[in-house]
Amino acid sequence: MKSRKRKIQIAAAILAAYAAIVVMLLAAESNAEGSSIHSLGDAVWYSLITLTTVGYGDISPVTPMGKVLGALLALCSLGVFTALIGLFINYISGQARPRRRLRAARNRKWYAIDEENEQSEAFARSVFADDPDAVIVFRYSKEKHLTGRHVVRLDCSPKELIDIKGGKQDITYICMGNDLWENYCQATDAAGLGIDTYCLNDFGSDKLTGNLHAFSKKEIISRCYWRDHPVRRNEKIIVLIGSGSIAAELLERGLLTNVFEPGRYIRYHVFGDSSHFRKSHREAVKTLCGGDPEEDSLFLHEECWEYHPEIIRTADRIIICEDDDRSDLETYEELVRMFPTAADIHVRLGKDVELIRCFGSSSTVFAMRSIIRNEINRLALTLHNIYNEGSENPVGWEALSDHMKRSNIAAADHLTVKVRYLLDDDSITELTEQNCRRAFEVFSNADPEKRDICREMEHRRWLRFHQMYNWTYSPERDNLMRRHPMMLPYSELTEEEKEKDAYAWKMIAGVADRTSV
């Protein structure tokens, strides 16, 4: 699309220059004695036979200005001839040939990507790893990152793609440019045609509306990180170094996901600008920074991490998570060179670096499993469907409020933590039918004391989620003002209210029954 606009701009500029020469030629020759150019038609005719090097000689300029303009047209003739040949060749190689290749591959799955860049290349490689017969269509390419017989570059609209394929079936449209707003605009247009569309943006995975899906880079990074690097039982102190959007997302997702059984608490030390986090999550900050011994602790440091060597020394895990790769590498180098620590150090980098424990690489973030087959989204929908099966008034996903969608997604995030706890295995990173069934069996056979621990764990998770979004206690529920009667410590709940928290554990069986886990 961008290259097409550029071509149109160039063509418009050439046309404007040509028109200006013709008008100037007519102005110079129309009233000159002995001139044969008296009308606009004469001027256009002379320009055309001169540019095409035909030169009949029936019309020619007589004034000095006319002759200069005629010489200019003559000099341009070779360029015009060359340009015509170039346009023809460009059409054959840039339009006709790709269209012919696409028509020959109509029976395959097409992934149309609006812009070819490093992140879309990572996605394309993931597609080919999953489906070698798939076709990747790059609609705009500044640089060619990927080659292959199933890679096609064609500057055409989503509607033209539908016309070439003969329908919108098996077309997936991906907007992965650096301009997030332009991604959204293009994705909206494509989705409006009925194409299954995925858009890189900051909306997050709770935006699962119709055939338009948003995915957020920072959200995928945070989810993949806490999934692939679960907190071990011996880890008590976690340090985050970073002040960008990725650091904020990692902290928020970590606080929502890493909620464990009573007695197992994490101390988070965050170094970076936390002013936005303080303002956005007032209730959670109030609770976690309040020094409650029966809750996780959050320390938001205004000073640089270098001023706290004792925290670095005693940390169990250090996460370096600025938005910029260079800053992360510089921080890592300074940390390992100047500060003694036995902590596991994790560094967010766009590409994996040897001998450094990295996370957030493009190959992980922009993989099929993270975008098209997002496990968390599927689990969230599964949990919601299980809940609907036991509800007298089932509600479809699209009818849910954003808050309820986020609530389901947060519950899906925590499901792996529940399974790890029941199976006493912190190494589990994937949910399978087998480990879900084993976990549910453990829960079903648990004694009353362990079941009570499970219920309290779930209530703390539910309470943490609502605190993160600034809900407060009220005897009467008020969704608009974010007030809820169960915003209380577990010990203050009634037995009936406590038993509601057991339902989240019983849903593990329902998840196991879904073979798509």
Image (cartoon, grey):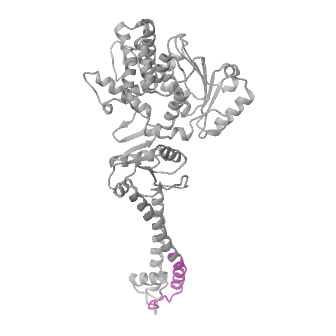
Would residue 407 be counted in the magenta stretch?
no
The quarter in which the C terminus is drawn is: top left
Q: Visible in this render: residue 470? A: no
User: Residue at 59% across / 40% down in the picture?
Assistant: 350
How far across and how far down the image is residue 19, in percent?
Answer: 45, 74
How far across and how far down the image is residue 382, in percent?
Answer: 36, 28
For the record, the magenta segment spans: 56-80
Front residue of 30 and 178: 178
Task: Judge whether 68 appears above or below 232 on screen.
Answer: below
Front residue of 94 and 307: 94
Q: Quadrant of residue 339?
A: top right
Q: Visible in this render: residue 160? A: yes
How far across and how far down the image is residue 313, in percent?
Answer: 69, 20
Front residue of 16 and 6: 6
On the picture, is 393 further left or further right than 309? Answer: left
Task: Judge whether 339 appears above or below 66 on screen.
Answer: above
Front residue of 56 and 319: 319
